[in-house]
Amino acid sequence: MTMALYGMDVESGRRLSEEFARTSDRLLALSGSLTPLITGAPWNGDDGKRFTDEWIGHRRQLIGTAHALAAASKAVKQNVEEQVAASRRLEASAAPQTTGGPSIFDQLMDSVADATEDLWDTAGEVTEAVGDTVSNTWHYVQDIAPLPIRNIMDAQGNVFSQAGNVAEMGWRWLTSGEPPSITELVSNSVMLAASLENLRQATFTLGFSNPHLFDDGRPVAGDPIPVGVGNPEDTDDNGRTQTPVPATVSAILSTTDAAYSDPGMPGTPDTGVRITTVEKPGQPPAYIISIPGTTRWEPDGAANPTDLTGNLELAGGNLSTAAEAVRLAMEQAGIPEGAPVMLSGHSQGGMIAAALASDSGFTDRFNVTNVVTFGSPVDSTPIPPSIDVLALQHDGDPVPQVDLGDATAWPDGTISASHDNGATIVTLPNPDVDPGFAGIEYHHANRYVDSVSQQEAGGPIAQYSQQQSTQRFLTSDASQVTSTVSNISRKQ
């Protein structure tokens, strides 16, 4: 006599989920590897432009299909887990009752706890979906509206966003028991006040004026553009500073320094993030994301998101538009789930790297194993201990100190300072140059490249480079390395 099968065959379900996930990764990797070849091919004329434009459309379809397969993988995996749980409950109900087992009350409480957890998870998913729908609808209407209405809607949306940041800051206080740091309080207060001033001016002028003061807007990222790999003193065929082979920690810093030359170049009119792929035989590709720091100091919400506004957003403990644009650039580059990722950033770029590494939504999508920052204030960023972090700073560089060492003002008037992550902090001797005003000359990225190259033969930098996680990104073989750059931008 055979029993009919009800529900899912869990082994088949697991295989299906894994196959969906593998196919998704393959599509993303294929999209990322083909794009630099196609866009960089020496094919001029109308036919070449038409082919490239058509590929961009096909690429978006590939990425969309990959994301749909990833979602299907998660859905099947969840159904497998539900089937396993249901089977266990059925087996438990069919098993003979014995003394000493859980009481009826305990079973009831377990059932209530399970139901509450399911309800909480469902509520979170529904809230996120509704929030995304409302936000997308609001932005769509804003984009097609006449300028006066668009300005008022933008100002209103900015107030809601900044009020949400303040509320999130308060929520972190309630859930952690630790008040916001002084830097977070000041930054979020300035941003909220600026958003209210934008709304006042937009309303007063009936929408014909919106100063966009400290308005961080929405993220935009361009398609990846191939960059030559070699000596960073040289340029590639397109006139870009070449990406150095990542043989050492100082070479990784040098790539971030090279990214400062990308703003204003063809394809990167605002600023660029470089993505270096290392493919060693027998290992999955590893990706180094090199993020430059502040390249514009005005607070007027212009297209370049690595400006003063981006600094304040990050100092407030929020994900800036520049950080969100880096995420978009990584997705469009086709970095597959599970592939090891190192985030490297200087100054504001290091703040972006730390903020992304501490964001669970980002790390659920990307397997961040390493973070390297230099000249960055990252003391207050709660990066998970599973991520290996190296924070480099010159002794006299004032920028890493702008977070005041995560100084926190408690309600009773006391002030404490601590580190919210387990970073390996290396304080380097100041370079032998004129320090300039308040030591700002010690802050330049190229100074850090020189200092680290002199110090990395031993000590904590050498120890960091020898860690297993770091070794996946280091190679002296240029044939194992490819590089791209993507424009990151802001849209109001």
Image: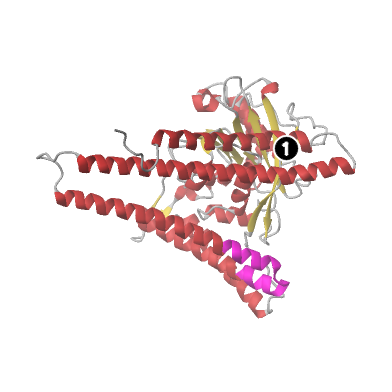
Q: Name the one closer to the observer, 171 or 72.
A: 72
Whether residue 265 is visible here, answered yes or no, is: no
> Is residue 65 found inside the magenta-colored segment of the image?
no
Identify the residue shown where x is 40% and y is 55%: 122
Q: Name the one closer to the observer, 300 or 366.
A: 366
- Percent position of residue 253, x then y: 63, 33
Q: Is residue 229 left or right of residue 106?
A: right
Residue lying farthest to the left in this orientation: 99
Q: Is residue 22 left or right of residue 415?
A: right
> Magenta region: which residues?
135-155
Whether residue 294 is visible here, answered yes or no, is: yes
> Is residue 151 found inside the magenta-colored segment of the image?
yes
Q: Quadrant of residue 142?
A: bottom right
- Percent position of residue 108, x then y: 20, 52
Residue lying farthest to the right in this orientation: 45
- Percent position of residue 66, x then y: 60, 41
In the image, what residue type sits under mark 1? Thr
- Percent position of residue 237, x then y: 83, 32
Identify the residue shown where x is 67% and y is 74%: 149
Q: Which residue is mark 1?
A: 35
